[in-house]
Image (tube, rainbow, N blue to C red):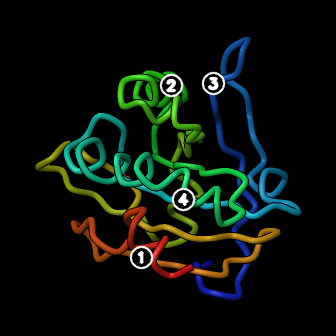
């Protein structure tokens, strides 16, 4: 499957840290009947993910909400423990950004958006993308070239609305 405007986000079981520990989240349930921003990045606590990508969505969160976005979801090939710590460390959790882990990378691989950069210690990670999703349907989509962090940033997606 490939992401495309007019297409649906895939069925996927992702993980998050709930009040009592790790919880499974069905992505389709999270998107049903709602206007949501979904963006993905290679990994928590990694270079541009921490210094550029997540901060761009923290900066734009309120502007997205003013345009009717109900939730902003960050997907990464990480476990829920790491994502919880990263969300707290970056201020993303405080900004209301939800972190969902594609812990085994199956959703990312199924989308054909996985990459491996052994010299960086990144194996089976997600390429960067950002989408506006309405009731599960992708209405706006920006996919960066591998290794770039430009059009998948919060400001770039916001500019398309």
Labelled disc at residue 63: 4
Q: Distance between the Cα atoms at labels 3 and 2?
A: 6 Å
Q: Residues within 10 Å of mark 2 (few under 14, many from 20)?
A: many
Sequence-wise, the earlier of marks 2 and 1 is 2
Labelled disc at residue 91: none
For this rendering, which residue is in front, 87 or 100? Answer: 87
Residue to which mark 3 is pinned = 17
Q: Is residue 76 left or right of residue 3?
A: left
Q: Is residue 18 left or right of residue 149?
A: right
Q: Where in the figure is residue 3, as x and y percent of width and height? A: 58, 78
Residue to which mark 1 is pinned = 143
Residue depth check, mark 4 versus mark 2: number of the one nearer the observer: 4
Marks 3 and 4: CB-CB under 8 Å? no
Q: Secondary structure at mark 2?
A: helix
Q: Is residue 65 left or right of residue 105?
A: right
For this rendering, which residue is in front, 158 or 9? Answer: 158
Q: Secondary structure at mark 3?
A: strand
For this rendering, which residue is in front, 52 or 62? Answer: 62
User: In the image, is residue 54 above or below residue 147?
Assistant: above
Q: Residues within 10 Å of mark 4 (few under 14, many from 20)?
A: some
Residue to which mark 2 is pinned = 84
Marks 3 and 2: CB-CB under 8 Å? yes
Residue 126 falls in which quadrant of the image?
A: bottom left
* Residue at figure coordinates x 28%, y 41% from the top left: 50
Residue depth check, mark 1 versus mark 4: number of the one nearer the observer: 4
Sequence-wise, the earlier of marks 3 and 1 is 3
* Residue at figure coordinates x 73%, y 11% from the top left: 20
């Amino acid at each position: 499957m490939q992401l495309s405007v007019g297409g649906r986000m895939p069925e996927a079981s992702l993980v998050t840290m709930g009040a009592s520990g790790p919880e499974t989240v069905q992505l389709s349930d999270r998107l049903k009947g709602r206007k949501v921003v979904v963006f993905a990045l290679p990994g928590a606590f990694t270079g541009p993910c921490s210094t550029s990508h997540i901060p761009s969505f923290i900066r734009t969160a309120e502007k997205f909400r003013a345009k009717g976005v109900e939730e902003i979801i960050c997907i990464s090939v990480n476990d829920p423990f790491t994502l919880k710590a990263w969300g707290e460390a970056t201020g993303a959790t405080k900004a209301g950004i939800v972190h969902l882990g594609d812990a085994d990378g199956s959703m990312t691989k199924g989308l054909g958006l996985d990459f491996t950069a052994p010299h960086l210690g990144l194996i089976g990670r997600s390429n960067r993308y950002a989408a506006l999703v309405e009731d599960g349907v992708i209405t706006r989509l920006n996919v960066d070239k591998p290794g770039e962090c430009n059009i998948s940033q919060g400001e770039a997606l916001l500019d398309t609305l």
